[in-house]
Amino acid sequence: MSSTNTEFVEAAFDDSGLLGAPRSAAESPWVVMKFGGTSVSSAANWKTIAELLRRRLQQGLRPVVVHSALKGVSNALEEILKSAVVDDATDALGKIREQHYSLADALGLDGPTMLDETLHELEQLVAGVRLVREVSVRVRVRIMALGELMATRLGAAYLESQSLPIQWIDARDLLTCSSRGSRQTSGAYLSASCDFAADENLQATLLQANKVILTQGFIARNKNGETVLLGRGGSDTSASYFAAKLHARRLEIWTDVPGMFSADPRVVPSARLLVALHYDEAQELASAGSTVLHPRCITPVRESKIPLFIRSTTAPQIAGTVISSVTEEIEPQVKGICIRNGLTLISMDGVGMWHEVGFLAKAFAAFSENGVSVDLVSTSETNVTVSIDTSDGMLSDDVEESLINDLEKLCRVRVISNCSAVSLVGRKIRTIIPRLAPALEVFEEERIHLMSQAANDLNLSFVVDKQQGSRLVSKLHAIVIRKKGASTVFGSSWERLFASDEALLRKPDAWWMKKREQLLELADGQLNAYVYDRDSVISAARSLLDLKNVNRILYAVKANFNAELLRSLAETGVDFECVSPGEVEWLEQTIPGLDLGRILFTPNFAPRDEYAWALDKGLQLTLDNLYPLQAWPELFNARQLFIRVDPGQGRGHHEHVKTAGVHSKFGIPRFEIDELARLVDAAGAEVVGIHAHSGSGILDPDNWRRVAGELVLVAERFPGVKTIDLGGGLGVPEKPGDKAFDLERLDETLAEIRDAYPQFDLWLEPGRYLVARAGVLLTRCTQTKGKGEMRYVGVGTGMNSLIRPALYGSYHEIVNLSRAEQTPSETVTLVGPICETGDRLGSDRLLPPTKEGDVILIANAGAYGYVMSSQYNRREVADEIVI
């Protein structure tokens, strides 16, 4: 499904039938094409962009190209602004320079000649921030704008080199924002709005150029001539403004996904493409959490009745989603299940508000005066609860404090942070609530903080704790969204769209496909088995041991304590991290003569006897709570200790595996460090290591830079510290399209840490990374069942052997190993024999027609599989086999 084939294929645009557009727009020669950060960050994508522009010109159209900064650059600039206040940003600036030079080189351009002036301006601005130790809003805006300005210089030069007629124009000369009054004046610079009425002067100016116009997204100018930003996702909004001003024939948004889907495919791979949507529905989906479009970009094209097409730069042959005022869909139905994270609830209580005239006016005036926008609202006689979106960081601590102080003059106020809104989005939701009743049972055991039914009858939203959000989305989608057929609004699923890529790109590389015949032989004669590939474990271990900037790798034994795998890891030179006496004793039994100095012991909320036992054995002990030092200081006199610190923000693929943050039970928070130092001195102990573990399934190597920064601040309080233990959590690809963890980038990050703090040894504690991909669960199809739209494949084991899907909502790739060469054609739910509704190993999976006796393989089962199994229902757990 790639655009790098020898013959370029692009799905045709059919905008002639969108009769909602006025005649002038339908006949307009202008087409605005917006390309996102991913689309403009590789030479392969630029070849696609050049071909797309040639085709538009051949069709007699006048393209206007709007594009973003290179992928990750805006985030990198944000990080530079944060770090420059307290630290040197030279390395981060160097990475931005290298990213642009590297792309320029791939495009055959002279990067230094083209970009050095802009890069020098960036360095000067950052140096000024470093000097005054403060970032003004105007300086922030100037720095953030440079990302788009640099990227578009490269884009224009490349397209010119491809013999395309290109004119680069500064977007600030084309877009002027309208002012908005607010106490929070930074909003006028960071999230500005522009007039988008049709502009004949602009049309005439661009027509006179007689070239393809290339300009920036995200930036504009205010009436004082100052640079302003259009907020996060502002490039979509810029493109929409240009389309409206030019009265364009259509707006094309080119991104890394081929349209809007019924759910986030990263969470629900069976999510279906939404082929056609009304503006209102698209607006609702975008507002409810669909990240393909920014909600603000809908209004200009809707009011100008300009159709909006969403396409993928890497898959231009997929027709994607069209958004317009024309839709054949009139039946009530749910079209999408969305999740929006980063919500904070403000709950206002008081008996006095009952029948009090003007209470709501006073309360909402407080929000207005503090420049805080209210999202969802729920009211009763004695309570009003509202949600505010804090995901973009626009709500600063001082503004939140001011808001709370103002509200407390009216009522009691409670703040509930770290929430998510799960929304069912569609048409005429109220009329189908009775039909949704079975689906809403998924909320039965969840705490719902707020429920809101939209006045426009387009969504039903539930605000829940963030940790439940993704799991609820998966369950709701499996129940509510039809797998096939339904209305013409629904296209193919993400899995089906990319099924051929999946077969070509992933499966042959998996060890279990290379050893398929051996696995089928092992499965012959037994119903269920965990199979581990020793070579894969050793390869993963060596890949980490080869890192140049790590002093020690310790394997988290809890992930998988298979004796043969432990011996293999020990032979490679990997050491061990244990969390219980049982794990230590099992290591001693499994690896006779093991040097106990190779073990780090990290108990959590354990009894006193375990700490005494560990110290008596001479184990290196980690404390992750003040209580042991407060209650049993005599244990630690003259002892050298590691301290586990809470780095403040957990990360990972599920909240249950995020092991840091205010809601986590792990680690000593930063605000207790003074008390920790006092207790350590009083006990006569010495801290020699600082340890943190921020979660599991983390795919961003920069996570460890942030963790290291937190740990070093703590280490400075304890002069005896020799080791910084960065924990584990290295991510493992799980879903189709997931990228492998970038070890080279991790090593570069660790090198930066070592260069900055050469006095410390660096340790890592991987668990899943070493064993997850090396293990598969083999089972057999026992029965199949069709129940309405639902198709079930029953297998010989379930949550008794692999509980992660039920416990975490985790995703495991599932393959019919007996028919691996056949094309997947059926969407099924895989269930086990356990008497529980939650006994599902995978929902809405694409498999070939499956029959009784077929061998089913569940991948990435080498970690937290067998070790978390049980004999629930008195069913035997799958055996373990090492090959």
Image (cartoon, rainbow, N blue to C red):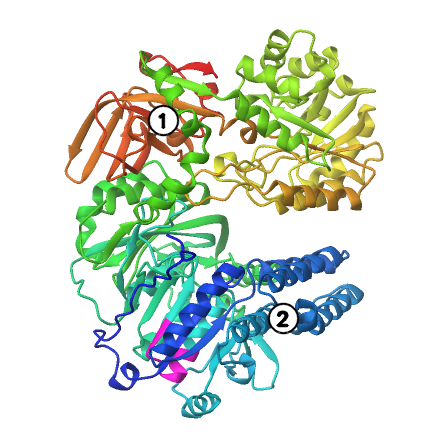
* Quarter location, residue 475: top left
Mark-to-mark CA distance, 2 and 1: 49 Å
Is residue 361 magenta-colored? no
According to the picture, the residue beneath numbered tag 1 turns out to be 857
The residue shown at (39%, 41%) is 504
Is there CB contact under 8 Å for labels 2 and 1?
A: no
Residue 480 lies, with reference to residue 608, above or below; the image says below
Residue 160 lies, with reference to residue 649, above or below; the image says below
* Quarter location, residue 577: top right
Image spot of residue 470 (x, y percent): 40, 43
Asked if residue 415 lies left or right of residue 797, the reply is right
Asked if residue 194 lies left or right of residue 134, the reply is left
Is residue 246 magenta-colored? yes
Residue 329 lies, with reference to residue 789, above or below; the image says below
Image spot of residue 51 (x, y percent): 42, 68
Question: Residue 146: which numbered mark, if any?
Answer: 2
* Quarter location, residue 726: top right
Question: Residue 522: which numbered mark, if any?
Answer: none
Say whether disc 2 or disc 1 marks the residue closer to the N-terminus: 2
Image spot of residue 18 (x, y percent): 23, 74
Crowding around mark 2 (Cα neighbors within 10 Å: few <14, some 14 to 19, many 20+) is many
Kindly state the secondary structure of the residue where label 1 is placed.
strand
Crowding around mark 1 (Cα neighbors within 10 Å: few <14, some 14 to 19, many 20+) is many
Amino acid bearing label 2:
Leu
Total numbered badges shown on the rendered structure: 2
Q: Nearer the viewer, residue 363 or 415?
A: 415
Amino acid bearing label 1:
Leu
Query: What stretch of residues is rendered in magenta?
Result: 242-251
Between label 2 and label 1, give the one nearer the viewer.
1
Q: Nearer the viewer, residue 233 or 381?
A: 233
